[in-house]
Image (cartoon, grey):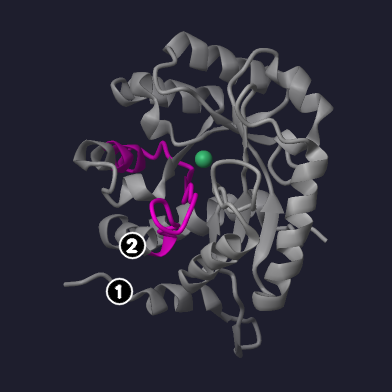
Amino acid sequence: MKAAPLGAIKNMFRHQHRPNGTEGVESVGLFDIHCHILPGVDDGSADIDTSLALLDREYADGVRTILLTPHYRPGMFENSEKHIRAAYAELGREAGKRFPDLVLLLGCELHSQADMTEKIQDREQFRMAGTDHVLVEFSSLDSQEQIRGCIFELLSGGYQPIIAHVERCACVVRDLEFARHLTELGAKLQVNADSVIGREGRETRRFCQTLMEQDLLSFIGSDAHDLKHRPSRMGECAEWLEKKMGAEYMRKILHDNPGRIFGAGDGHGI
Ligand SMILES: [Fe+2]
């Protein structure tokens, strides 16, 4: 039997029973904590029209809170905080006209580098929506020592690391015990929606599912970059999760976990 249509998923989030017995329609919605929808700042959306089209797709999929996470990587993506905030304000203004209940929060995908905690202290830009959470990206061939060292440094500095698309880290994929070790240290693991639904191959999908079955996964993000090659597929991912892992697990990963950290944002960056 085919998975429940997306409308059913949206309704699950929207209709809540209130204490007085009346049923209110509240857009609780899905979260996307990792994407490159902010226009003109990295290798993601090139312009405001593309960004709005990407938001349109997210909205149609039932997403109601989005963490905009432009890359920051020395020598490759080095936007100033001022530039990022200007793009955020512009997107917030335009999005507010079309999607009044869509919350946009500003985050960052920070590439692992030397002296990270010092750099994060200096720039709020590197944190996720002003929280102590940091979405950190590793190179695919970084060693376990490199990853452990970075995670330890962030935790020691009082930050909460979220490892971006952990399914790309070869040394984690081949050693599930290392994945467990990272979560026991305090890191949270994120995988991409495309990986979950099998667009990155069967082995990657299997690894993602194993993380879920072992309860090692905290978040899924779209990592959306553009409309053609890397759009957001959060709706398809929600359907997959509901079918394979159950509605409760889907809600935990796509709503409850991110909601506990980012649910209080008032959005649109204005
Ligand atoms: Fe990304």
The residue at 69%/30% (across/down) is: 78
Q: In x, y percent, where is residue 155? A: 65, 22
Q: Looking at the image, which is closer to me, 44 or 135? A: 44
Q: Which residue is mark 1?
A: 4
Can see residue 75? yes
Whether residues under marks 2 and 1 lie with C-beta atoms below 8 angstroms apart, the answer is yes
The residue at 72%/72% (across/down) is: 96
The N terminus - image quarter: bottom left
Confirm whether the magenta stretch covers residue 179.
no
| The residue at label 2 has a CB less than 8 Å from ligand 1 | no
Q: Hey, what amino acid is under mark 2?
A: Glu
Confirm whether the magenta stretch covers residue 213.
yes
Q: Quadrant location of residue 82?
A: top right
Q: Looking at the image, which is closer to me, 260 or 124? A: 124
Q: In this picture, is 149 found above or below 33?
A: above
Q: In x, y percent, where is residue 81? A: 79, 38
Q: In x, y percent, where is residue 108? A: 65, 39
Local crowd size for mark 2, using a 10 Å CA cut-off: few (<14), some (14–19), many (≥20):
some
Point out which mark residue 67 bears.
none
Residue at far top of view: 145
Q: What is the magenta range?
A: 207-235
Q: CA distance from mark 2 to mark 1?
A: 8 Å
Q: In this picture, is 77 found above or below 11?
A: above
Horizontal side of residue 266 vs 249, given as left or right? right
The C terminus - image quarter: bottom right
Horizontal side of residue 260 vs 177, given as left or right? right
Q: In x, y percent, where is residue 205? A: 27, 43
Q: Which residue is mark 2?
A: 242
Q: Quadrant location of residue 248?
A: bottom left
The residue at 62%/44% (across/down) is: 69
